[in-house]
Amino acid sequence: MYSSNELNTINLPVISLYQKASLMSKVTTQALYGENFKVLEKHKKWYLIELKDDNYKGWTSEYNNKIFFETTHIVNVSNTWVLSSPNIKSKPLMKLFSGSKLKVLDFHETWFLVEVYKNKITNGYIPKSHLTKLNKHLHWLKIIKQFQNAPYFWGGKTINGIDCSGLLQLGTKFSGLNIPRDTHDQEKYFKNTIFESKSDNLKIFSDFKKGDIIFWKGHVAIIINKNKLIHANAHHMKVKIETIASALKRINQKYIVKRI
């Protein structure tokens, strides 16, 4: 048994967390560069870790360096490159995904000088427009729309693959919320219910607003205007914008709408 309250920081662009200590197990979520975690248990080359932001637990074999570093900014685009110099033709050091956190040291014209861990602490450059201060809130729907057509991937949290609850969790992070990872917990987290279908004869509620969240059993979508929603779903196998009417008709289940 291994347990430590010591905080560590994810120092790879993304790692997958598994339900069990096996690559044959289900991926339950992913952790992004700059996320803090603590190790709860060790089994052979596997570690059970708990993420600080949402207290989510999972197994990984990619924990190979005990390192903790401070972060100041968050990546606000679907993905970006850390370059070796403030020049678009310079050597790429690392690819980072939306929601990744890192430390800004200085700025150079249109570039931020950042600190990254790649075998050791080193410096690189990211366009200023690709980073936002951690305490500055953005319109989270703009973040979510960047994921349109990203492939569906159970447990995923990047433009390379993402699921419905991962999309909601990642987006709302930019509004200052650290919501739970799984759909049923997210539904409990948001208290402000504005509509709930009572029968299988589903109808569209006429007062949906941008940013409202629709929960079905095991699925979630985000309303982007009075007629359309966006969600990562296994029917289209990607993040898809479609009409609210078409989604309700196809899913054909009772649903609940909540407002942040």
Image (spheres, rainbow, N blue to C red):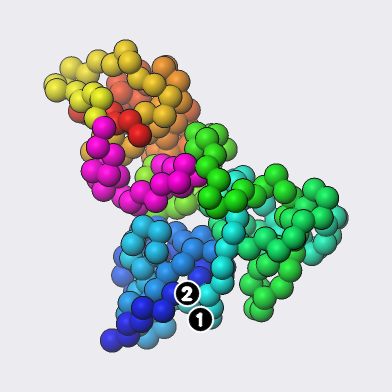
Nearer-the-camera pick, 74 or 44: 74
Q: Answer whether residue 152 is visible to the viewer in this image.
A: no
**Magenta span:** 166-192
Disc 2: CA contacts within 10 A as few (<14), some (14-19) or many (>=20): many
Disc 1: CA contacts within 10 A as few (<14), some (14-19) or many (>=20): few
The residue singled out by tag 2 in the image is: 8
153 to 190, vertically: above or below: below
For this view, does 33 lie left or right of residue 31? right
For marks 1 and 2, give the CA distance: 6 Å
The residue singled out by tag 1 in the image is: 66
Return the x and y of residue 188 as percentages of the image width and height: 23, 43
- Which residue sits at x=57%, y=63%? 71
Mark 2: which amino acid?
Answer: Asn
Figure quadrant of the N terminus? bottom left
Mark 1: which amino acid?
Answer: Lys
Which residue sits furthest top?
206
